[in-house]
Image: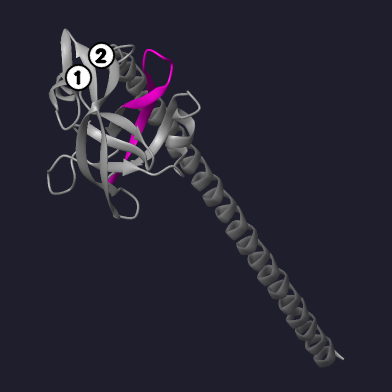
């Protein structure tokens, strides 16, 4: 009887030990799963917080850029608002380049003048845009409205090779063209020749109230 009792106790201890081991193993497994989920949730929350912080920083940076661009536009507009006109009797030739497709389009267009103390020929002349650029920084362009879109007739925007982007044009399907031809100012991010800029484009009217051109200012995002 004593031998059987000891055997029973051993069996009971073994069963209890096995049960306890299984319980401990389950507890550890559950704890690990819960810890993994907690760490994953924490990581996702941290990633979300970082993403939101970066987004806020980007929005803040964009707003600062746009405020400066708006100020620059107001300065630049002082040189063209009500002071520009076309002279159809004087023609200027351009081998114009579509800035999107690269297509070359020969153009014969009226001369474009603005008054800066005295009449200044703007077509292929950088005098006014360089003066404005020296005052405000960034880039400045005067466009002329043509059948093919908006032609850069004077600009401080440079191509990648360092040459001025005179003679390039924005086609009519561009949101910029659509906005300014409604007589409104376009503001925002836009592709300018070879790069992205924070920009503003404002129509230039002649004395008869027709949109004959556009004054542009921009800051390179690079």
Q: Helix or strand or loop: what does disc 2 sit on?
A: loop
What is the spatial separation of the Cα atoms under label 1 and label 2, in whole angstroms?
8 Å
Residue 129 in picture, x, y percent from top left: 19, 24
The reply to whether callout 1 and callout 2 are in contact (CB within 8 Å) is yes
Residue 191 position by quadrant: top left
Residue indicated by mark 2: 79
- The residue located at (59%, 51%) in the rendering is 41
Query: Which dot marks residue 10?
Result: none
Query: Is residue 157 in sight in this rendering?
Result: no
Part of the protein shown in magenta = 194-215
Q: Residues within 10 Å of mark 2 (few under 14, many from 20)?
A: some
Q: Main secondary structure of the magenta part?
A: strand
Query: Is residue 151 in sight in this rendering?
Result: yes
Q: Which color mode does the image show? A: one colour
- The residue located at (60%, 53%) in the rendering is 38
Q: Helix or strand or loop: what does disc 1 sit on?
A: helix
- The residue located at (30%, 31%) in the rendering is 143
Q: Nearer the viewer, residue 155 or 19?
A: 155
Which residue, as the protein is rendered here, is positioned at the far front? 89
Q: Quadrant of the N terminus?
A: bottom right
Residue 58 position by quadrant: top left
Q: Earlier in the sequence, mark 1 or mark 2?
A: 2
Look at the image and say whether residue 204 sits in the magenta stretch: yes
For marks 1 and 2, give the one nearer the viewer: 2
- The residue located at (13%, 49%) in the rendering is 161
Q: Nearer the viewer, residue 121 or 140?
A: 121
Residue 30 in picture, x, y percent from top left: 68, 64
Q: Nearer the viewer, residue 175 or 65?
A: 175
Residue 85 in picture, x, y percent from top left: 29, 19
Determine whether, in the image, residue 220 is placed left or right of residue 203.
left
Query: Which dot marks residue 132?
Result: 1
Q: Nearer the viewer, residue 209 or 14?
A: 209
């Amino acid at each position: 009887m004593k031998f059987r009792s000891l055997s029973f106790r051993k069996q009971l201890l073994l069963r209890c030990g096995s049960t306890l081991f299984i319980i401990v193993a389950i507890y550890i497994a559950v704890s690990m799963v819960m810890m993994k989920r907690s760490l994953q949730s924490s990581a996702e929350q941290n990633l979300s917080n970082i993403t939101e912080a970066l987004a806020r920083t980007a929005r803040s940076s964009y707003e600062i850029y746009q405020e400066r661009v708006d100020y620059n536009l107001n300065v630049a507009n002082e040189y063209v608002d009500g002071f520009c006109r076309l002279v159809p009797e004087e023609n200027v030739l351009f081998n114009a380049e579509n800035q999107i497709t690269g297509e070359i389009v020969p153009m014969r267009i009226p001369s474009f003048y603005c008054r800066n103390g005295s009449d200044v020929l703007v077509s292929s002349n950088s005098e006014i845009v360089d003066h404005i650029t020296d005052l405000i920084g960034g880039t400045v362009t005067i466009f002329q409205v043509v059948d093919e879109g908006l032609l850069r007739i004077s600009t401080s925007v440079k191509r990648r090779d360092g040459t001025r982007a005179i003679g390039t044009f924005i086609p009519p399907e561009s949101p910029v063209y659509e906005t300014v031809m409604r007589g409104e100012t376009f503001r925002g991010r836009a592709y300018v020749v070879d790069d992205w800029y924070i920009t503003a484009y404002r129509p230039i009217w002649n004395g008869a109230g027709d949109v004959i051109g556009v004054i542009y200012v921009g800051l390179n995002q690079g």
